[in-house]
Amino acid sequence: MRRLGPDDWRTWREVRLAALAESPRAFSSSLAREQGYTESDWRDRLDPARGLKAVADDDAGLVGGWVPEDRGGAVELYSMWVRPEWRGRGVGDLLVGEVVAWATENGHPSVDLWVVDGNTVAERLYRRHGFEMTDESMPHPDHPDVIERAMSCPLGQR
C-alpha cells in the first residue's frame, strides 16, 4: 500500500482514469470530466488536507478517505476500486484496511461508506472489516435509479 501526496498525481490519475473507464456507474464523476483535469487539479485532490488517497501495490486498486463536515468526525471511505485482474486476491481488504488504519491513527470515531444496494460482494468485504448496514439510504448522485445504502464501522473498540 502507498499513501499518496501531490507529487504522486500521475499515479493517482492513471489508476483513477482506469477505474472510471472500467466501472463508470460506480463513481460520482465521469471519465470525460476527469480526463479534462489539469496537473494542478490532480495535485489539489492529493493534498493531505483533503484526506487520504492510497493505491495498492502494482497499482492494483485505489481508495480514498475524507472527513465530511456533516458526519460527526467520521471518515468516509470512497472511490474504492480494484482492477478486474486483481479481484478476489485480497486487494479490497488491503484498501479498506488502509482507510480504517488512517482513521484510527487520526482519532476518528468511525468509518462510514456508501454501497450500492444489492452489491453483496462489496457488503461481505465491508462486513469482514466490522462495517454494519445503517438505516440511511439515498439515490446515487448521478444515477437516480441506483440506491446506495450507508454502512458504518465504529473504531472505539479497536
Image (spheres, rainbow, N blue to C red):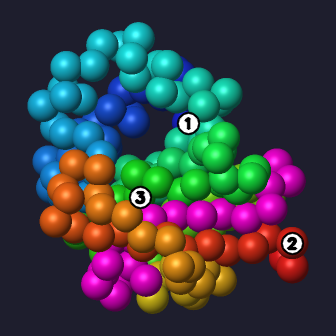
Residue 75: image quadrant is bottom right
Identify the residue at horizontal 50%, vertical 71% (top origin).
Answer: 136
Q: What is the number of the mark on residue 73?
A: none
Q: Relative to 110, say whether 71 is above or below.
A: above
The residue that disc 3 covers is 80
Report whether 138 appears left or right of 110. Answer: left
Q: Earlier in the sequence, mark 1 or mark 2?
A: 1
Identify the residue at horizontal 41%, vertical 11% (top origin).
Answer: 40
Identify the residue at horizontal 67%, vertical 27% (top origin).
Answer: 49
Report whether 142 appears left or right of 86. Answer: left
Q: What are the residue bounds of the magenta stretch?
A: 105-123
Say which quadrant the C terminus sits in: bottom right
Q: Residues within 10 Å of mark 2 (few under 14, many from 20)?
A: few
The residue that disc 2 covers is 156
Identity of the amino acid at label 1? Leu
Q: Residue 109 lies in magenta, yes or no?
A: yes
Identity of the amino acid at label 2? Gly
